[in-house]
Amino acid sequence: MKSSGLIPFLLIAWTLWLGAIAASEQVRANDGLGWDGVRFARYATEGPKALLNREINDYYVQRMGPSLVVHGVIRALGLPFDPVTIRWTFLGMNLVLLTGSILMLVDLCRRLGLSLHAQWILFLGLFLNPANGRLPVYYANIGDSFAFTLGMAMTWGWASRRAWVLVIASMVALVSWPAAFYLLLPLIVWPRTMDRPEAAEGPSAPALPWGWAVAAFPAGAILLAASWLAAQMPTPEWSPRNMASLAMNAWIFGFALVAVLSRITAATLKTVFSAWSARGVATAVALFLLGRLYVASTESGSLAFSEVTYWREVLLYVRTRPLAPLVGHAAYFGALAVVACALWPRAVEAARRLGPGPFVAIALMGLQALDTESRRLNANWPLIGLCTVLAMEPWLRDSRVVAAAAAVCLLFSKLWWRWSGADMFAQAHEPANYYNLQGPSLSDEAFVAHLVALSILATVTWLWSRWTPALRSGDHEAQGVS
């Protein structure tokens, strides 16, 4: 049996979180509750009353779960519902959930046969970044850690063949982070059947042919135009900047689609149409109807912010800056997000070899990745990170590669931001303002800096993946790390 990195993983994560606590890192707006966080703090104070009185619209009513948990904990402990207590309760919940995520991560790696090197890169990629290394403390009451844990729980439940985990996580997602349910729904419909991932046919998954890469632009333009019409967005101003942004982000949109289409074979289609579970489909339908019933019986009917408004916001940011989604994901999720972008066709291939459930889920997640506010992709991150590392694993036998990858993860982590961020971008970022490390809120200087770093790392990763011979599947299993 391969050794586990569980203890060092927990030590590293808790060192990061306790360091952030010791440095008093917290969002400075509204007594440490932040902007949207004030809303969730109010829900935590009112608890079920806010639902019973139909005070919340359909968007936020589906994100009540974390606030209800905090309400129950504070009430059970007999504590006051003040900003300090609410923030610390959210913070404690975040750290408990993320600790559970690390436990699930280690068991997930064991079940899928990942080497210890691959486990390390996956852990560092998932946690050595603002998303999980600092935000759970800095902006404790925003619900992101809840989303990540739901994504991890559903991925682990699929890998461990625990249908009850998928059902419970889905029910929680429907009242906490509905994207986790809809995007990971394929894991319920197509349960895991293979004991180990399907072996690659050659040394590595083939790169995306140039024809597909070229076809990504018209495909993305059609998708973007259809989205624009569906969201009833006004015609964009055809300035050079807007045109460049729309063109480049349309290519990203299309690339996510064609990378999936290029991996579909007759055998893949046969598996997709034959491996689905009737019980899984029935469960998915029942959960969907349960979610709709919950919304219909609790929401206020207000149109202040809705799912349509959310998609309009995504499209608004898409026309703002070229490559905005990629830069936002690199800034928020760190180095592994850059690698995922550079190796996306290979990550999709790794998902395909896991089975139709992960393959269909990854296809949906790639389309949602157009969203530049990266925190809304938190539930996707465990599966995307896993498939990216599976695509890289043939190269991870070399300790020098692992050491270099760990160093790059640290460089991209932004965990040094508190001490140097204000000096680098003084006018836009106050010290420790990790929340501004997302596409929509990056200053022009920070955007350019991240774009340059992303371009260098993505290019190096892409060239390295083409030039470095990977181990064959049999050789890789033989050399496993003890």
Image (spheres, grey):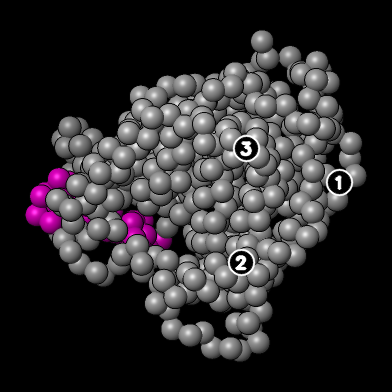
**Residue under numbered circle 2:** 220
Residue type at mark 2 is Gly
Estimate the x, y position of residue 386 in percent, counting from the top left: 61, 36
Question: Which element is circle 2 on?
Answer: helix
**Residue under numbered circle 3:** 268
Closer to viewer: mark 2 or mark 3: 3
Estimate the x, y position of residue 327 in percent, counting from the top left: 63, 62
Which span of residues is magenta-colored? Answer: 28-54
Q: Quadrant of residue 234?
A: bottom left
Mark 3 to mark 1: distance in Å?
A: 25 Å
Estimate the x, y position of residue 17 in percent, counting from the top left: 50, 39
**Residue under numbered circle 1:** 466
Say if mark 3 contacts mark 1, CB within 8 Å. no
Question: Which element is circle 1 on?
Answer: helix
429 vs 409, left or right, is left
Say if mark 2 contacts mark 1, CB within 8 Å. no
279 vs 197, left or right, is left
Question: Which element is circle 3 on?
Answer: helix
User: Could you tell me which residue is drawn at 17 percent across and 64 percent down?
Assistant: 301
